[in-house]
Amino acid sequence: MSETHKEVGTNVSQDSGCTSLSLGRKHEASIHDLTPCVDAPIPPPLLWPRLRVYGRDAFSEFFGTMILILFGDGVVAQVLLSHGQKGDYQSISWGWGLGVMLGVYASGASGAHINPAVTFANCVFRGFPWRKFPIYALSQLLGAMCGAAIVYGNYKSAIDTFEGGAHIRTVPGYSATATAGIFCTYPADFMTKTGQFFSEFLASAILMFMIFALKDDGNLGAGPLTPLALFFVIFGIGACFGWETGYAINLARDFGPRLVSYMLGYGHEVWAAGNYYFWVPMVAPFLGCTFGGWVYDLFLYTGLDSPINTPWMGIKRLFGPFCRKKLALQNLV
Amino acid sequence: MSETHKEVGTNVSQDSGCTSLSLGRKHEASIHDLTPCVDAPIPPPLLWPRLRVYGRDAFSEFFGTMILILFGDGVVAQVLLSHGQKGDYQSISWGWGLGVMLGVYASGASGAHINPAVTFANCVFRGFPWRKFPIYALSQLLGAMCGAAIVYGNYKSAIDTFEGGAHIRTVPGYSATATAGIFCTYPADFMTKTGQFFSEFLASAILMFMIFALKDDGNLGAGPLTPLALFFVIFGIGACFGWETGYAINLARDFGPRLVSYMLGYGHEVWAAGNYYFWVPMVAPFLGCTFGGWVYDLFLYTGLDSPINTPWMGIKRLFGPFCRKKLALQNLV
Amino acid sequence: MSETHKEVGTNVSQDSGCTSLSLGRKHEASIHDLTPCVDAPIPPPLLWPRLRVYGRDAFSEFFGTMILILFGDGVVAQVLLSHGQKGDYQSISWGWGLGVMLGVYASGASGAHINPAVTFANCVFRGFPWRKFPIYALSQLLGAMCGAAIVYGNYKSAIDTFEGGAHIRTVPGYSATATAGIFCTYPADFMTKTGQFFSEFLASAILMFMIFALKDDGNLGAGPLTPLALFFVIFGIGACFGWETGYAINLARDFGPRLVSYMLGYGHEVWAAGNYYFWVPMVAPFLGCTFGGWVYDLFLYTGLDSPINTPWMGIKRLFGPFCRKKLALQNLV
Amino acid sequence: MSETHKEVGTNVSQDSGCTSLSLGRKHEASIHDLTPCVDAPIPPPLLWPRLRVYGRDAFSEFFGTMILILFGDGVVAQVLLSHGQKGDYQSISWGWGLGVMLGVYASGASGAHINPAVTFANCVFRGFPWRKFPIYALSQLLGAMCGAAIVYGNYKSAIDTFEGGAHIRTVPGYSATATAGIFCTYPADFMTKTGQFFSEFLASAILMFMIFALKDDGNLGAGPLTPLALFFVIFGIGACFGWETGYAINLARDFGPRLVSYMLGYGHEVWAAGNYYFWVPMVAPFLGCTFGGWVYDLFLYTGLDSPINTPWMGIKRLFGPFCRKKLALQNLV
């Protein structure tokens, strides 16, 4: 049993699609290997570690996104509710930046997407299995909701004081002491719908372009510095493109906490604000990340796991089975 | 002799419980190894290096925690006493963050806990020997007290000027020119006791969850970047959850300097402030760190040194001897 | 085909001058190597990946410089247009610093120059082929122009609001609500022409001196930390020498966006401002980078790829063919 | 010739005391090694590279300290002269921190001391040859003076504007528009002489304690992250202990620029200010660094190159020849 789990532990960053199958086989082997040098019978596989293997991806994305939201929503709460005495806009860039960095460290086992749009772009351009997309997106959403709820619990007294009462909960644009901005993003007043969409699209495209660059060993590649480099990417997007729409660039990060704030009584305005802005950070990140990944692959990526580098730029692949085995045989993936 | 001490030096990050025993044996060996190529008789083992081996863990934790407090209390002193001219709230996040980072670099020999609650969680979840807990906790406490005393000595003139006289020493909530906040944490006014406790509990849980994530090679793992990543963890906790209670998350860091400030004449108020808040940062970190570590191990950790991954989730282990040898034979620990 | 492109991918940081020649030969080889273990005929080399090899350097420098300008111009736009509410001068140092860092990660395939003056100094002191200089400089210029245009598109509404109308576009020194400073640099009022030139020259010299130091393995060398160290270099130049002229230190970074701002209707003042300052950040970086590189090589560099370490300090080399082959035979380059 | 210089280049971080001797011998060897595979006669050793070997340490420390002062004095100039519009106190912490980091990268060839007190402590505790101390200290001093002069040249117009005229140069405490603080440190008003001395002593001790910790492979050790970790050390000292005396902690950094400012016409007050404070940052760093290094070696260091770990704690060694050869034979140094 031990050997088996160890093996799962060390291979975490690879596609573990067939892990459950190989588990059985490897187990028998490990018993025989270990028998001569231990003085007690090997216990049978434990129930929880055995079950946990099936939920590994989900748990990993859940906690990664929860860490992201804990730090991200937490820093906005602290800066807003302390009236800027315990931080300023730069603190917010720090908080979201290190939220992503630490979320990535927490969720390495599942590939550290912590963003449905990143999962989506990985499915399209890096052969990440489509069947995993729903469970990833759901785990990310639930993790974000859980994180937002914890931040609310932690800052409840301060929100009461800020809003002026325990039952007053308001949304930016409707009140001067609004606190809904702690949880999800609300665009600046002067933005048109097109501008909102373009801003989120652009930030998402930059995000995905940089993620692909950082993970591309054919380029410089950030290697073990990737989480740190992602801190700089997110900090940079916050400092350079964060004003107009609040750089959600992530359905889970925005929709999850927005749902929680609606449940907590912030009212219909969480949807209506910014001329029903809420759908923009749900749709734009998918399009932006896909575009950013496409630009990177088209001009800079030479790896064969990208459809851009396959016949007909992968269009054929969309309509046929993806012969992963063939590539694996060539040691190319 | 030389060989012996070298050996101590290179194995510092491991459990050195049996180092003193092996010292004698290895010494004889090293004499014979070196005899042919040196032109002078090897001197006998020196008194102080030989004694120091026994105090290694204690010295290491002492200085690690002292460095933490020197930078941490130092930055609060500088920001407060200069009326914000030489730093702002973000400087304080920097100071505590790099205090932990540099404290960790200074105390690598003992595992760099510099926090009794971290030592406790390591005992519970990582098989760290319980017999070491008292000496670790005591060293950390003394190191923190020593650090606070040095900061006081360095800033005495400035405190006199700030408070209005050499014999005036006041505590936040009792005076507008209070300086006791330099040494230990005092909660914000609006906090209930439950809120105080939850805030410290949450920050401690996040701390331990992230420490386990950063040290987990089955996850991404931060490897040699761990001290730097801890800077971001502490910075993040300070920027995102640091307002309400001052994020002590460490008995040694809070109780030690609080005791020093009491000795220095800040009066009974250091205990009474915040409705006798002082016990919260003593108790909550232990519970929070244990909870955070438990969550990480339950959902994400696959290593066999965690009781979660042993039969009955380690409950059995609590009532029986921990068969470390057996695991060692399997090369699993 | 696959093997061939893989090979291109892994050798990206070397001089790929002869890549296109070896492509053909290697291709035959790879077919034979792979034939036994694949179940389908290898497709012929694809059109786009085959063409892309020729544009690799250009694409790489284009996107690297675009990323630099996206973050750099973006942060200035956000700080200026939000009247300092969403950032301050330190944010600008962050933005340019991480713009260079991330631009370097994006353009590793071509050596990550993203600055014509850096390319120039590499030609002079590191044997970088002169024939590549024009294509590098042009790609960098076009990338910077593209980045500036995107930033303009993203912040158009905010610029309209700030300037007071969709058709008002003004330059610093001619209006209190000028926004041309988003795109390129304008010197402080009190600067003489000599001071402007010296300031740009000095900052460029420090930049090149540090780049050579960071890349010199005979010195400490930053190795994989180079992009991070460059963040500190640019942040430092911004924080220490950035006030007087805005530290362009890069023809592409300054002239490209200046041209874009002229096209966008900022008027003749983009050239006339600061007593026709625009040519200083075009000329000074070349002289400064060359001087900084010369100082480094003269006093600290021991590598043989620098002309300083060849007979007559390379003066002979300027008038004769550079016998690269000879050095290569000695494994010295 | 080539081979010889390459060899010098790759061994730079070691004691190069005997390099000049081995140069001759190695040269003959390299000719014969290379003869068969080159098509031209090897040129004789070049004059300048051959001479440069003797000045390597001096050049390296000179430029390292110059880089430190360029960034350090530069950031103070920018913040002060722009009336805080282009930076604040935190920028100053950044500037000095990255000045040290980049100075260390520039001067790796000589061990990157860039501080006479660090050289001194290395002589006392790490067997660094005493005969090198004078040349190191002098190079550091000259480098600092050169850096300060360049900063003055760069900011001359701005200083004129700030002081109110080209011939007015004043010192803090004597004028409200004093600019002498750009170059060297002046203590806060409320400090007693004892407090000044203790503050510099403490900061120097922390500096040396941390340098020894970061370089100790028997502890965690920062390895290739050392320059980055030093950024945090200096940033931390600036943020936590930088207010009272300006954390000179370096004779070269303070006395060199002070001398330059005296030459530039700041008058006798550069010496008289702070009740003749100028000697404190000359003396205290040596005592503080020695004390900090002694504490680290006494309690935490196990390496045999420290006298603390030799008989009689090295007192004997002070009065007898240090048998380096013996240790070298044992591969212990």
Image (tube, coloured by chain):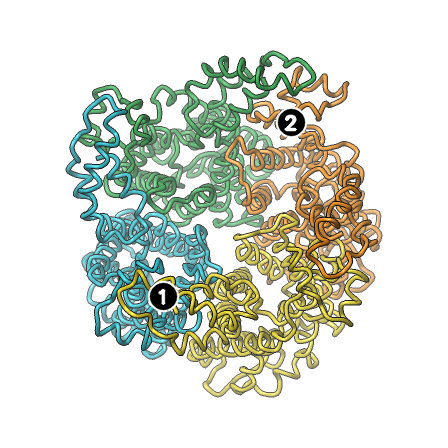
Chain colours: A cyan, B green, C yellow, D orange
Dot 2 alpha-carbon crowd within 10 angstroms: few under 14, some 14 to 19, many 20 or more:
some
Residue D204 falls in image quadrant: top right
Classify residue A119 as left or right of residue A96: left
For residue B21, above or below residue C67: above
Residue A311 falls in image quadrant: bottom left
For residue C34, above or below residue C223: below
**What amino acid is at disc 1?**
Leu
Judging from the image, mark 2 belongs to the subunit labelled D
Q: Is residue A177 visible?
A: yes
* Residue C219, label in figure: none
Relative to the observer, which residue lies in front, A20 or D249?
A20
Residue B238 placed where, x, y %? 42, 46
Identity of the residue drawn at 79% across and 64% down: D165
Classify residue D67 as left or right of residue A155: right
Relative to the observer, which residue lies in front, D83 or A127?
A127
Residue C326 placed where, x, y %? 69, 61
**What amino acid is at disc 2?**
Asp
Dot 1 alpha-carbon crowd within 10 angstroms: few under 14, some 14 to 19, many 20 or more:
some
* Residue A304, label in figure: 1
Classify residue B175 as left or right of residue B333: right
Measure the alpha-carbon separation of dots 2 and 1.
53 Å
Residue A263 placed where, x, y %? 18, 58
Q: Secondary structure at mark 1?
A: loop
Identity of the residue drawn at 65% across and 49% down: C219
The residue that label 2 is drawn on is D305
